[in-house]
Amino acid sequence: MEVFDGKKAAQEYMSKHTLAFSTPELTLMRFAFWLGDSVPDPNNDGKGIPRMMTFLTEQDFEPVLIDDDKYEPSGAVRSSANVGNAYNETQSDGKFCSECGTSLSATAKFCPECGATQE
């Protein structure tokens, strides 16, 4: 998959242009025009391409999908059902994880130990 490397493009642009007295809007507009300038195509002699195409890099990565119904513990939360809970509550009902038996808060959606979804 080809991905635009904006950081590399911005660093090259800023190293070649002095913009000390420009406003952020003007700097961004000039950067956009600079990316659209026609430059010689390194693969085809005599042809021109937008400069933006020279900053495309081939990357092989799997997209990260975030699933709100599944939680996999990372180890950052350990042995405390109240970590990250915005509610101050007293544990009166004795809610426990259905998978591992860890004591949970009444509003817990996932178990902090095993990651099991709670009803």
Image (tube, rainbow, N blue to C red):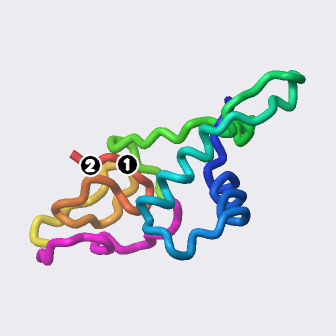
The local crowd at label 2, few if under 14, some if 14 to 19, many if 20 or more residues have their Cα within 10 Å, is some
Q: Which residues are magenta?
A: 74-90
Q: Which quarter shows the C terminus? A: top left
Indicate the quadrant where residue 48 lies.
Answer: top right
Inspect the image, locate mark 1, and give the three-letter code of the amino acid beneath it. Answer: Ala
Q: Secondary structure at mark 1?
A: loop
Indicate the quadrant where residue 70 lies.
Answer: top left
19 is higher (above) or lower (below) than 28 = below
Seen in the image, is 69 located left or right of residue 87? Answer: right
The picture places residue 35, in percent across and down from the top left corner, at: 62, 43
Q: Which quarter shows the N terminus? A: top right
Residue 75 within the segment the image draws in magenta: yes
40 is higher (above) or lower (below) than 21 = above
Seen in the image, is 85 located left or right of residue 35? Answer: left
Look at mark 2 in the image and give the residue it sits on.
Answer: 118
Give me the C-alpha separation between circle 1 and circle 2. 6 Å
Residue that appears at 49% across and 69% down: 22
Residue that appears at 31% across and 50% down: 98
Look at mark 1 in the image and give the residue it sits on.
Answer: 116
The picture places residue 91, in percent across and down from the top left corner, at: 15, 73
The picture places residue 66, in percent across and down from the top left corner, at: 43, 43
The picture places residue 26, in percent across and down from the top left corner, at: 45, 59
* Front-most of residues 10 and 82: 10
Residue 49 within the segment the image draws in magenta: no
Question: Does residue 59 show up?
Answer: no
**Which labelled disc corresponds to residue 71?**
none
Residue that appears at 31% across and 55% down: 97
Question: Does residue 45 show up?
Answer: yes
